[in-house]
Amino acid sequence: MSATPETDAAPGAEILFLAEGELAGLVADLATAAVEVVGPAATEPASPAAAAADVLHGRPELEYRTLAPGVAPLLAPGMPRLSLKGFFLPQTEALFAWRQHGTEIEIERGEASARRRVALGVKPCDAAALEIVDHVMNWDFADQPWNERRVATTVFTLACPVEDGSCFCTAVGLAPDGTRGADGLFTPVEGGWLVEPSTEKGAAFVAEHAARFATASAALVDEGAEARRAANERVAGHLEIDAESVREWIAGHFDDPLLAGLGVRCHGCGTCASVCPTCHCFDIVDETDGVGKGTRRRSWDTCQTGKFTLHASGHNPRNDQNARFRQRLNHKFSIYPLRFGEVLCTGCGRCSRECHAGQDLVEMLAAIDVAARRPAAVGAETESGGPA
Ligand code: SF4
Ligand code: SF4
């Protein structure tokens, strides 16, 4: 097994069809083969108000879950509140246990994390995040647990109808029917799903379960293509930015009041980082379990909290929330692109959707894009005889 994630190009397979009735059979086959299935499932409403909200929205809230053997994922519209990242970078995990014997240290690694699994019905923005985060997870150090889970997991995205106005995947070079970071795509059509593997791994998965799939008819292929075209058009209307201009503007305007004041409503709860598929910061602590023994654990962390950059001296280089929020934008749309060639954002919209302070990334990026393009606009006006 390779130690790094597979990102091979599509092998150009034919378009297949999985009938609704075959989905249960497919997950039963996977259960028989002891393959773990991860996919969207309805969240149990935590309160009468949450249940009422489900009724109001006409559908239950979803979450990605490791499904019980034989249970099918809910391949329906809806954005799981948390992204898929927790299945590759858990909220908290023991990296290893240690025990001291005099001057010797014995290390015991946590249980093997690389059980074979398939994730079905993943949002394209969540799958793309995996490949984007691969950069940093294999930058100056190869993150073994991340890579093992990536290699062990086959991911199929589900073409997204576009959830709401917070979605903007096309503005960051992605698409609601994308397969980046995935091994294939499911597209809902009458009576089932079109299935298109996009990597060798995806093709192997389909071949392994060939009896469940049929060749898609031309009418179904056309139906799927039209739905995907319409979804792309819808989301493209939410936001359009020039990513390179935005990156350059952020890099060159550190103290600009627009950038430095964007965090005015933010109070540092960190929700945006928790729900974000690309935020990947973690803290590592040693928890002692007794004399001379303990566990080294890593847990999600976020630059939005005051203690993230607090020095032991008491000095904090990001000592107010505006500075912390600027860092979030700076890292995602300027620093990461400079280092790895692409933004650290998939346009999933969760940070805007879930922020109870009303911090709206779509609005902010639109404002920065206008500021970034302003010199060009002024130049164009001057050239055409407009005001200088
Ligand atoms: S932007 Fe919103 S979600 Fe993120 S830390 Fe600030 S208040 Fe919390
Ligand atoms: S920054 Fe916001 S829109 Fe971008 S990937 Fe994270 S949660 Fe989604």
Image: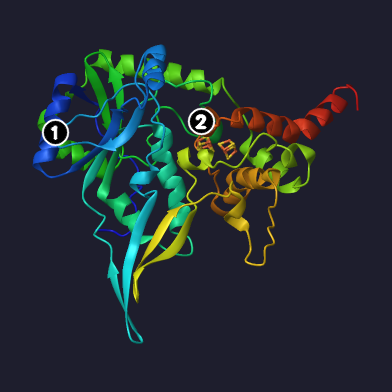
Residue 49 vertical position relative to residue 33 in the rendered view, above or below: above
Q: Residue at x 45, y 49 (%)?
A: 133
Tell me the residue that label 1 is attached to: 70
Packing grade of label 2 (10 A; few <14, some 14-19, many >=20) is: some
Whether residue 4 can be seen here: no
Residue 171 vertical position relative to residue 77 in the rendered view, above or below: below
Of the pair 371 and 330, the residue shown nearer to us: 330
Q: Amino acid at mark 1?
A: Gly
Q: Amino acid at mark 2?
A: Glu
Extreme residue in the front direction: 290
The alpha-carbon separation of the residues under discs 1 and 2 comes to: 32 Å
Q: Quadrant of residue 368?
A: top right
| Total numbered circles | 2
Callout 1 secondary element = loop
Packing grade of label 1 (10 A; few <14, some 14-19, many >=20) is: some
Tell me the residue that label 2 is attached to: 354
- Going from N to C along the chain, the mark reached first, 1 or 2, is 1
Mark 2 close to ligand 1, CB under 8 Å: yes
Specify the quadrant that holds the C terminus.
top right
Callout 2 secondary element = helix
Residue 262 vertical position relative to residue 252 in the rendered view, above or below: above
Q: Residue at x 41, y 15 (%)?
A: 57
Assign ligand 1 to one image quadrant: top right
Q: Which mark is residue 110?
A: none
Of the pair 304 and 332, the residue shown nearer to us: 304
Q: Residue at x 41, y 12 (%)?
A: 56
